């Protein structure tokens, strides 16, 4: 990371600013930290303010490699499960490309009225210049504090970011950035493939099959148990699993049990199991974070050309 930052700082590696205020939501630990729910909460806040946000992402795990727009009916296998979830849940423009600046250019070309760009993941993607950085932690914190492979860190911590979000059940990681607590929990409902909902409470007292293909599936199972659900069967699959062939085997039958999964998994699972019930993960962020965000957004300069420098480059 030090070498890469030096190369970008010297200009030997090229970076671009999208030309709109850009917020990167990322993490420094490997594995799931809950970035996507934070991105969706951030997008909903911007929409509530009357802004028109757009989202860019790499589209991890997709079968395609081109730059493309994520539509509400885009197959998750072609755009990535997290971008598909964001597009369906938030109804905002979403573009994916390995080079986030390419995704940003395509987004603005198709949706020039976009006010703010939110990048889902990309804290270490230095080719994209940004104005604000939000680093999200789970209750693991920085773990043992070592870099991969000896520990969970992608880069040394502490590092300069604008804000840190951490679970209210865990202490804030040490560092100079302002920290804000967030609370993760399951929604009060489960969603069907047709968009209808049933109260999660209505499933109490019935054995169910819980499935999760996320970085920490036991977290999902534990939250279901805390809601009083009887998990007669659990299936933990690798993060971003595409479920190819899954529905044909013993696990896919579910033993006629109601099948519960995460909202991220549902966008891939519903074509195979339209009867699956998606239980969304919701986050509640300290309102002080949004107050600080609004104050910073008010100070950002008017949109600039794509070749212009950002308010704060990622290599500073």
Image (tube, rainbow, N blue to C red):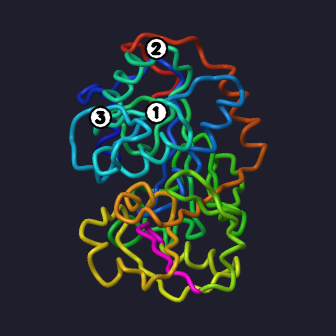
Q: Which residue is mark 2?
A: 112
- Alpha-carbon distance for marks 1 and 2? 29 Å
The one nearer the camera, 308 or 274, is 274
Q: Which residue is mark 1?
A: 316
Q: Residue at x 36, y 13 (%)?
A: 307
Report crowding for label 2: few under 14, some 14 to 19, many 20 or more residues within 10 A (C-alpha): few
Identify the mark at residue 99; answer none if there is no mark. 3
Q: Which residues are magenta?
A: 207-216
Q: Residue at x 35, y 31 (%)?
A: 69
Q: Which SS does the magenta portion mostly show?
A: strand
- Alpha-carbon distance for marks 1 and 3? 20 Å
The one nearer the camera, 73 or 112, is 73
Count of labels in the image: 3
Classify residue 169 by image quadrant.
Answer: bottom right
Q: Is residue 183 magenta?
A: no
Q: Residue at x 35, y 21 (%)?
A: 105
The x, y position of residue 34, in whole percent, is: 54, 57
| Marks 3,2: beta carbons within 8 A | no
Q: Residue at x 46, y 74 (%)?
A: 211
Report crowding for label 1: few under 14, some 14 to 19, many 20 or more residues within 10 A (C-alpha): few
Q: In the displayed structure, would residue 178 be above or below residue 258? A: above
Q: In the displayed structure, would residue 145 be above or below residue 284? A: below
The x, y position of residue 8, in whole percent, is: 31, 32
Q: Secondary structure at mark 2?
A: loop
First reached walking from the N terminus: tag 1 or tag 2: 2
In front: label 3 or label 2: 2
**For the view shown, which residue lies furthest in the bottom direction?**
232
- Alpha-carbon distance for marks 3 and 2? 19 Å
In front: label 1 or label 2: 2
Classify residue 268 by image quadrant.
Answer: bottom left
| Marks 1,2: beta carbons within 8 A | no
Q: In the displayed structure, would residue 194 be above or below residue 69? A: below
């Amino acid at each position: 990371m030090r070498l890469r930052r030096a190369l970008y700082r010297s200009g030997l590696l090229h970076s671009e600013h999208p030309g709109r205020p850009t917020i990167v939501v990322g993490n420094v630990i490997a594995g799931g930290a809950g970035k996507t729910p934070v991105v969706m909460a951030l997008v909903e806040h911007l929409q509530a303010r009357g802004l028109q946000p757009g989202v860019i992402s790499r589209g991890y795990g997709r079968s395609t490699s081109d730059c493309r727009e994520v539509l509400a009916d885009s197959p998750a296998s072609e755009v990535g499960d997290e971008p598909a979830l964001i597009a369906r849940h938030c109804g905002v423009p979403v573009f994916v490309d390995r080079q986030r600046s390419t995704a940003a250019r395509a987004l603005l070309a198709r949706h020039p009225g976009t006010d703010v760009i939110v990048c889902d993941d990309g804290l270490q993607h230095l080719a994209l210049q940004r104005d604000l950085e939000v680093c999200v932690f789970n209750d693991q914190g920085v773990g043992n504090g070592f870099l991969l492979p000896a520990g969970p860190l992608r880069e040394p911590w502490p590092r300069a970011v604008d804000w840190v979000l951490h679970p209210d059940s865990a202490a804030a990681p040490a560092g100079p950035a302002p920290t804000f607590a967030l609370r993760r929990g399951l929604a009060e409902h489960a969603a069907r493939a047709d968009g209808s909902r049933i109260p999660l409470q209505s499933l109490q007292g019935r054995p169910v099959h819980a499935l999760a293909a996320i970085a920490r599936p036991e977290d999902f199972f534990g939250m279901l148990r805390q809601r009083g659900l009887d998990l007669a069967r659990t299936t933990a699959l690798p993060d971003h699993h595409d479920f190819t062939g899954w529905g044909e085997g013993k696990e896919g039958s579910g033993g006629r049990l109601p099948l519960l999964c995460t909202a991220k998994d549902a966008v891939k699972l519903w074509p195979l199991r339209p009867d699956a019930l998606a239980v969304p993960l919701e986050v509640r962020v300290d309102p002080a974070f949004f107050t600080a965000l609004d104050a910073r957004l008010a100070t950002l300069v008017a949109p600039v050309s794509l070749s212009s420098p950002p308010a704060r480059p990622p290599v500073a």
